[in-house]
Image (tube, rainbow, N blue to C red):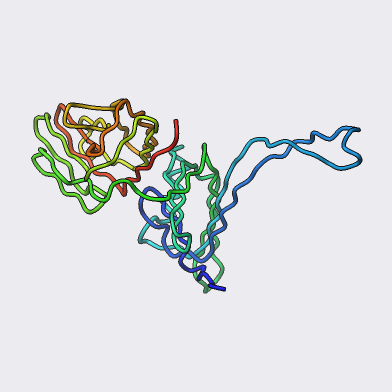
Amino acid sequence: MAKINASLLLVYVDGVVIAAQNGVTFNVNQELYDTSTKDDAGWATHGNGRRSFDVTIDGLVSTTGISAAELVAYITGRNDLLLVIEGGLTYPYVMQADMASVSLTGPAEEALTISGNITGNGPVYHMTANLVTTLGASDTYDTFTAVGISVTEAIDAAGGATADSDNIDVTDTYKYMVFTFLTNNGGLELPTIGLYSGAGYISNQPSMTAGANFITLTATATDATSTLRLENTAACNYELTDTYVWEIAV
């Protein structure tokens, strides 16, 4: 029987690995409510209630990757985070969550350690494939640099700029989930995002926000050569972490 090295299992926050991890525990939970009656011949029965998830991490404090100070800032700033768990699972789990607690432990003459508890905010998604492999297949920005599924810079002085992913086979019987983290580098206009075909958009076109983005695009047409399009109509300067796109049934 094949074994999986637990060292491969890592937690990423907003596209950046939590530095110096030693342990990860990922719990997916379901509340079961009692439905037992006298007709059940003495056997307990139950119904399926609310589902939830939580993650605990522990490791050493590091100044690289997502640091202890940055994890604490998610609590003090009351900011959501984009959580990705991957490594040894074939495909990653992607979810929206919040830091519930962060603890620092500093024993004498030993390494400073950190532990944290992360609580889910909504559903957890197990990706079976990412529908995009690049976000820079074409663009009209003044400066646009894509590294695979992330964008390190998207700058335009006047707007009227777009950037497209590689082709997505879109079907109007599906919704398309987009998860990414956006950093606004200039306080300027943030892009809209949508599914685009040669004749125009074939989905809603919501505006993105600074921070974690959890966006649902509802396809209104079928097109095997569609793209995921970013668009700005005014000056902009932003970047995106790894961007995940997959389909769910309507």
**Horizontal placement of 226 versus 88: left or right?**
left
Q: Establish if 21 lies above or below 149.
A: below
**Horizontal placement of 50 versus 117: left or right?**
right
Figure quadrant of residue 184: top left
Q: Establish if 99 lies above or below 187.
A: below
Q: Establish if 17 lies above or below 131.
A: below
What residue is drawn where x is 39% and y is 30%?
173
What residue is drawn where x is 45% and y is 34%?
249
Residue 245 at x, y = what percent? 35, 43
Q: Nearer the viewer, residue 186 or 141?
A: 141
What residue is drawn where x is 67% and y is 35%?
49
Residue 155 at x, y = what percent? 14, 40
Figure quadrant of residue 154: top left
Q: Establish if 45 lies above or below 235.
A: below
Residue 62 at x, y = what percent? 41, 63
What is the number of callouts on the image? Answer: 0
Q: Nearer the viewer, residue 186 or 137?
A: 137
Quarter that holds the N terminus:
bottom right
Quarter that holds the C terminus:
top left
Q: Nearer the viewer, residue 208 or 134?
A: 134
Figure quadrant of residue 178: top left
Residue 240 at x, y = what percent? 27, 44
